[in-house]
Amino acid sequence: MAALAGLGVLGAGRHLWKLPVRLSAGLQGCGPRRGYIAGSAERFPTFGLLFDIDGVLVRGHRVIPAALEAFSKLVNSQGQLRVPVVFVTNAGNILQHNKAQELSDLLRCKVDPDQVILSHSPMKLFPQYHSKKMLVSGQGPLVENARALGFQNVVTVDELRLAFPELDMVDLQRRPKTMVIWTGARGVTSLPLKVKVLCLGVLLLGEPVRWETNLQLIMDVLLSNGNPGTGLATAPYPHLPVLASNMDLLWMAEAKMPRFGHGTFLLCLETIYRKITGNELKYEGLMGKPSILTYQYAEDVIRQQAERRGWAAPIRKLYAIGDNPMSDVYGANLFHQYLQMANRGEEEQQTGGQQKQQPSATRSCASILVCTGIYSSQDPGSQVPTPGREELPFHGHRDFSFSPGLLEASHIVHDVNEAVQLVFHQEGWA
Amino acid sequence: MAALAGLGVLGAGRHLWKLPVRLSAGLQGCGPRRGYIAGSAERFPTFGLLFDIDGVLVRGHRVIPAALEAFSKLVNSQGQLRVPVVFVTNAGNILQHNKAQELSDLLRCKVDPDQVILSHSPMKLFPQYHSKKMLVSGQGPLVENARALGFQNVVTVDELRLAFPELDMVDLQRRPKTMVIWTGARGVTSLPLKVKVLCLGVLLLGEPVRWETNLQLIMDVLLSNGNPGTGLATAPYPHLPVLASNMDLLWMAEAKMPRFGHGTFLLCLETIYRKITGNELKYEGLMGKPSILTYQYAEDVIRQQAERRGWAAPIRKLYAIGDNPMSDVYGANLFHQYLQMANRGEEEQQTGGQQKQQPSATRSCASILVCTGIYSSQDPGSQVPTPGREELPFHGHRDFSFSPGLLEASHIVHDVNEAVQLVFHQEGWA
């Protein structure tokens, strides 16, 4: 089997800089010759594909036609994938297996739950919080997701609201009709047994509903050091640990303009925390693209997939296909930077959570930007600053510094079908 | 009738600086002698009282006992008020007459709707927007309030959401089940006739419910120049006019710690607008304490009240009693500063809206801070910065610069009863 000479690509726009990459060890056969196919047997892939979902494969619940074409190329005659594939989404208000089923139906290709990486999946790597009582915010199968991540002791914002009805006051209709008697002291609230145990941390798994309620109660927990309903003289700082996933400010749904993502909720929370206390809210863990944690996790899943399929060649290269420059391109390029540094033998960057147990064979990660979602090369608005400004506003998260180079995709293509064609061409696959 | 020599007071804490004030013209009788009572006939008041409500008179729906004592002093044997009184609240999600009725019941004293000044009441002074189609955000009797202010052509956020269901996407349960067919173009939405007319401005009347929906749709209207559902290449700037009322970050309800006010919602909107566009959201009108607009309006109502009651003496002094340093104290002191400048013959500050038609007789405005609400002298937490900070965080609105002197009340008293006693003492009333 020929091994491909992978090309490390960190591009400025469409320019390719070819970086030498070691041949994959353990392969038999020919030296690196692009395009060589050894008979009709399928070669072991030495690359993996990371697909974003919204704006790349689907818009809302509708499949993007190019995705069908792309996946028809990716499966063999038995309907199995020919290369390791994961679906890396910043969504989190869903169950892995439901998303896998939805993708299977839409793409007409069997997708296993393990192939679906949600924004919070890397939280499995934070076992030090798994037995602590955590306040969890999000919607959909929230508790189920928290448990699947390993958190055994969670209380939802809604449960907290019911236990402390005097805390959620924005909605006139929800205000309690009977109140504790105001005796001249600052009021007494009786605590149901269930929530007498202090919250020891906060989990932000995805956009909740009723942001006013969630923002208020999360702030109450942080300012009371986990014991809402009490009033502390001074807000503790550092505050309780906060783990959050999905920092996307915007995402592409059916509407013409992108919709608020969880990143907008986090922005509100950070701003409110800073306004009220004067201090910065700090995350113990912040994951989902473009966090390196997510790419490390994805790389691991790709590697395990290759092993299960009996593909002997180590995975050398990842291609990340997405529609959002700030999460997909930035993240892939950041990870590529990380891999380059790791390969040069430098000390692994601290990225929180557990350190990976297995040494990584991956050498590079290329970013491919499609135009069917957030980014659109036909929409000058996405490239034109608003009047009065010299440059486009930075839509990334506060904790990610604005490095313009990291926002430049290795490749920009029209859609995911073109992306797959490009990868095959790069890798010398038919 | 003796006329009182009003004392202009702008204090640093509890120190009083006595500023000379002209005698009220048109009065007969004695010169200024404090404490003099001409027989048993009630003197014409030359002062008016502005009462904040939450944290001063009530906590939620419970009357603060000191308020009953205070008002027993303020009414005569016929149950009528002896001095002009207005209730100036930053609340807005209520009807004037409902609040008046509630206060009448709680205080056991007849309160007319006209005596209740809500945060948005000064919007009556913006007739240039009254016939324009305005998107209105808030809750409770929203449309009724908007109409009462003079706005004849409003569309609510909820109506907009129903007309454009693809815009409100945070709540998984609200997402439309059937979508427009994605044809490869950016989608087409059919517009119900009702909302085909462009929105020409935005009215923010108070905290809405479901902040995610309101924030999203308000942003859509601003970014689309009033035509949501379309996608403009460049967000227009300046944006559509925005009128907002109530910038209170926090307010005191039954809970031990203050609750988010409309100011928190505005903070989220301003932050999101800046993050997405890179530009600052600007208000055409921002009212409610501490805006001078509100005090000008209140002063006018006080004056009209005095006229209706046949009190011939001009009102020289206002006392504003509140619990929130940033809205009540700051506002009263800012208004005092404004009155001082006006009296010195300087050009009236531009405060937006219509200029007042009648010359003002008022010379000063004193701020009295009570400890039964947001501010509590017994709570060291309200005076101690959080760890790591040198000074207390600034809870005022972005558009009000942090002038520490303006945050210092003329007087700090325990409760509203002491406040009224202090006023009577100052004015030489029994």
Image (spheres, coloured by chain):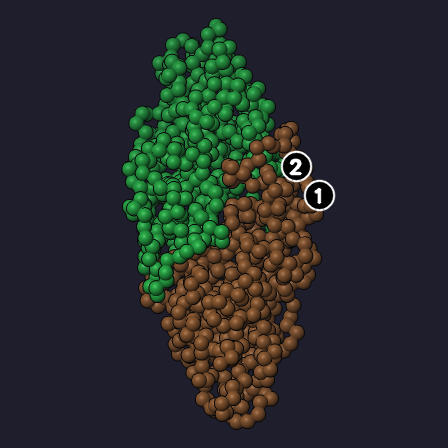
Chain colours: A brown, B green
Task: State which chain disc 2 sits on.
Answer: A
Q: Is residue A262 left or right of residue B340?
A: right
* Residue located farthest toward the bottom when viewing the structure as drawn: A30
Q: Which residue is mark 1?
A: A193
- Helix, strand or loop status at disc 1: helix
Task: State which chain disc 1 sits on.
Answer: A
Identify the disc placed on residue A189.
2
In this rendered view, identify the residue nearer to me: B90 or B28. Answer: B90
Identify the disc placed on residue B413.
none
Identified at 34% across, 39% down, the residue is B154
* Residue A287 seen in this snapshot: no
Closer to viewer: mark 2 or mark 1: 1
Question: Residue A345, percent across and down?
Answer: 60, 79
Rendered-image quadrant of the C terminus of chain A: bottom left
In this rendered view, identify the residue nearer to me: B426 or A165. Answer: A165
- Amino acid at dot 2: Thr
